[in-house]
Image: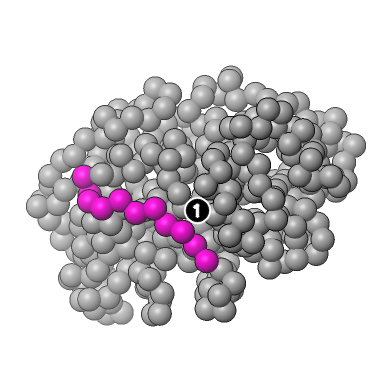
Amino acid sequence: MNRQWVLDHYPDGTATVDCWRMVETPMPVPGPRQILVRVKWLSLDPYMRGRISPAANYTAGVQPGGVMQGGGVGEVIASNHPDWKVGDLAEAMGMGWQEYAVLTPDLPGSDRTNRVPAGVPEQATLSWLGMPGLTAYIGLTEIGRPVPGQTVVISAASGAVGQIAGQIARLMGARVVAIAGDDAKLDHCRSLGFDAGINYRTAPDLTAAVAAACPDGVDVFFDNTGGPIHDAVLANLAVRARVIICGRIAVIDKAPNEDIGLRSSARLVVTRARVEGLVVFDWWHRRDEAHRALIRWHRDGRLTFREDVLDGFDRMPEAFVRMMAGQNHGKQLVRL
């Protein structure tokens, strides 16, 4: 049998563990040019919150009764595809919250099934060498483009995307300021080379704290949270700043009419700043390029990464809830 977590109901506000229920279904059977994998690792990512909302999103979500979406790594246990054999390790965004999955390797783009490269931990393809790594790489090299000496501010800086983005910004010669929710997370960011840190939970005036940490203004803002952090940084933009809107975990549980903060249009005019949204799935064609750079930096000791691992398939809803609450330290994973 195949155990699966399916969506029981849409959350009303913050997602809770009872939003999902476990079911057992017959073992799936691969068809022509498909493979069957035993799932070993599953990824938890903030984008998943949008997949369990009835509101329109940039891609189709999960309907109640459907298997929860998510990426994972698994071992091939049966293959009807000539390029895949039993024992191969596969990574796919479409693994889903289940113990066994049928994958179609020939699908294009973000639906593609990828081999786990030799010489790296197998779960790395879900973290620094996976979707978070590609997000950070594209955000900095394509949109942010800091030049040496400029100031880059990163919210949720100790998270899966933030910690990579900060290290890439340092490699590009920037001064990097971390924003995170506790001092231990900021200490981790400093250990990665971040130059300064702001605890948004304890700062009495967040806008003033950003101004103090960035006396010449913010040249690049990698925004993973939205909300009050977004407002505080936009009030401190430098001339011709670039703002990367990547995530909105701080406001994603709020109704659309509550997601209203600082009206920044005047500041954008004065600074001539550019604001661009980033959906990483638009950039999947750059994945191989990003992989080469990330592997090189990791091999050279210039890119390190922290993961937060829970053990057991039973803990998937728990892992999701703790990630959304910011209780994880590093990339949230579940090892089956």
Which residue is painted at 45% across and 49% down in the image? 329
Which residue is painted at 30% across and 39% down in the image? 318
Which residue is painted at 24% across and 60% down in the image? 39
279 over 302 or under it: above or below: above
Which element type, helix, strand or loop, lies under badge 1? Answer: loop
Question: With 90 as the anchor, is 127 left or right in this view?
Answer: right
Please identify the quarter of the rendering in which residue 146 is found: bottom right
Location of residue 104 in the rendering, given as x and y in whole percent from the top left corner: 31, 64
**Residue 286 makes an appearance in the image:** yes
User: Given the current orientation, which residue lies at the most extreme right position?
Assistant: 270
Question: With 124 as the anchor, is 165 left or right in this view?
Answer: right
Which residue is painted at 16% across and 48% down in the image? 3
- The amino acid beneath tag 1 is Ala
Query: Which one is nearer the viewer's eye here, 187 or 253?
Result: 187
Location of residue 182 in the rendering, given as x and y in whole percent from the top left corner: 54, 40
Marker count (numbered): 1
Location of residue 94 in the rendering, given as x and y in whole percent from the top left corner: 35, 55
**Residue 95 makes an appearance in the image:** no
- Any magenta on residue 305? yes
Query: Which one is nearer the viewer's eye here, 82 or 156?
Result: 156
Query: Which one is nearer the viewer's eye here, 131 or 309?
Result: 309
Please identify the quarter of the rendering in which residue 277 is found: top right
Location of residue 247 in the rendering, given as x and y in whole percent from the top left corner: 57, 42
Bin the neighbour count of mark 1 within 10 Å (Cα to Cα): few under 14, some 14-19, many 20 and up.
many
Q: How is the structure coloured here?
A: one colour
Q: Which region is colored magenta?
A: 304-314
148 over 6 or under it: above or below: below
Q: Which residue is mark 1?
A: 160
206 over 86 or under it: above or below: above
- Any magenta on residue 140? no
